[in-house]
């Protein structure tokens, strides 16, 4: 069993390859209060730097930051033997496996493992239990411009929103879509529907698009399919559609006695 030692907080240095770039203040304060009450329950992992009295954090920077907020002078640590590269790889992998890591942070971390340390997607996939296709999809997120990624994070949009934006081939359309998502609080399906109007060469976006695109096509298609399903089942359903600039109106007639409408064949 590895020995737990108390190390002064000022002797602990962050790992430069720590993929987590954002530490939410409310979460840190909550953890700091917990540490004040219960202490640091899980020791930090660290490695000694060049036989000095300084140590590099391999895993546990969040706990260190919260401990400093809680005014702790020392924190429990387990010192492991590993070189600089192994420490970096371990830190990245450990953080990727945490569910609260942002999806852009995760993509950036995977990219670092490939570009800085020469790991293949197959090797990373085995270590993380992820398929190569899942890793490729993560890496594709980095094709979005940096300022677009920042806006997505700031607005709290989902990874699926980000993937939808990858369908657009220029920043102007991306920002138009992002503005609409933010103002109208669009979900992913609504976002995809709007992007369809941009990417479909036969349908040019115009000032009326915003009024009617909110899932209307989905509902209309569903309605038409329902009418057709009834007809295929022998029910003589009839529908009439009226469309104006402001609304789409359907009038439907469905006979109560379906036996009379069934095909004699």
Image (spheres, grey):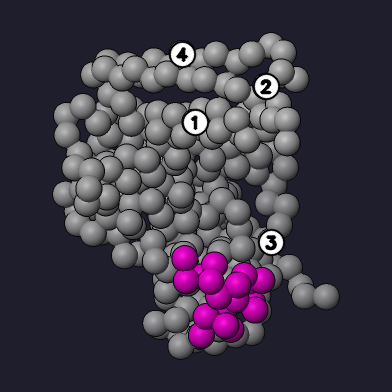
Q: List the residue tagged with mark 1.
A: 224
Q: Residue at x 40, y 33 (%)?
A: 217
Asked if the residue at tag 2 contacts the one at tag 3, i.e. Cβ–Cβ closer than 8 Å, the answer is no
The answer to whether one can see residue 19 in this image is: no
Between residue 184 and residue 33, name the one nearer to us.
184
- Residue 55, placed above or below residue 226: below
The residue sitting at the right extreme is: 1
Q: Position of residue 264 (x, y in %)?
A: 73, 30
Report whether 81 appears left or right of 24: right
Q: Main secondary structure of the magenta part?
A: helix
Tell me the CA gap for discs 3 and 2.
75 Å
Which secondary structure, mark 1? helix
Label annotation for residue 181: none
Instruction: Inspect the magenta stretch and tell me whether residue 121 lies in it.
Output: yes
Q: Dividing the picture into quarters, in which one does residue 96 lie?
A: bottom right
Q: Earlier in the sequence, mark 4 or mark 3?
A: 3
Q: List the residue tagged with mark 4.
A: 251
Q: Residue at x 33, y 57 (%)?
A: 166
Q: Earlier in the sequence, mark 1 or mark 3?
A: 3
Depth-wise, is mark 2 or mark 4 nearer the camera?
Answer: 2
Which secondary structure, mark 4? strand
Q: List the residue tagged with mark 2.
A: 261
């Amino acid at each position: 069993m590895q020995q737990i030692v108390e190390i002064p907080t000022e002797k602990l240095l962050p790992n430069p390859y720590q993929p987590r770039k954002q530490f939410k203040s409310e979460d840190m304060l909550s953890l700091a209060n917990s540490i004040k009450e219960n202490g640091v329950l899980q020791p930090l992992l660290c490695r000694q730097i060049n036989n000095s009295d300084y140590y590099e954090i391999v895993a546990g920077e969040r706990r260190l930051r919260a401990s400093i907020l809680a005014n702790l002078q020392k924190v429990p640590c387990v010192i492991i033997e590993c070189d600089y590269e192994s420490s970096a790889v371990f830190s990245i992998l450990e953080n990727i496996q945490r569910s609260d890591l942002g999806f852009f942070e995760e993509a950036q971390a995977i990219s670092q493992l490939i570009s800085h340390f020469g790991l293949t997607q197959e090797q990373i996939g085995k270590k993380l239990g992820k398929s190569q296709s899942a890793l490729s999809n993560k890496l594709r997120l980095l094709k979005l411009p940096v300022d677009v990624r920042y806006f997505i994070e700031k607005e709290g949009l989902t990874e699926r929103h980000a993937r939808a934006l990858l369908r657009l081939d220029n920043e102007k359309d991306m920002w138009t879509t992002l503005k609409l998502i933010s103002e109208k609080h669009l979900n992913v399906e609504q976002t995809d529907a709007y992007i369809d109007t941009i990417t479909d060469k036969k349908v040019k976006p115009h000032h009326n698009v915003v009024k009617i695109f909110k899932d209307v096509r989905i509902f209309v298609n569903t309605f038409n399919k329902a009418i057709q399903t009834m007809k295929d089942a022998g029910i003589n359903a009839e529908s009439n559609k009226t469309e104006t600039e402001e609304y789409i109106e359907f009038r439907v007639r469905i006979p109560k006695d379906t036996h009379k409408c069934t095909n004699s064949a």
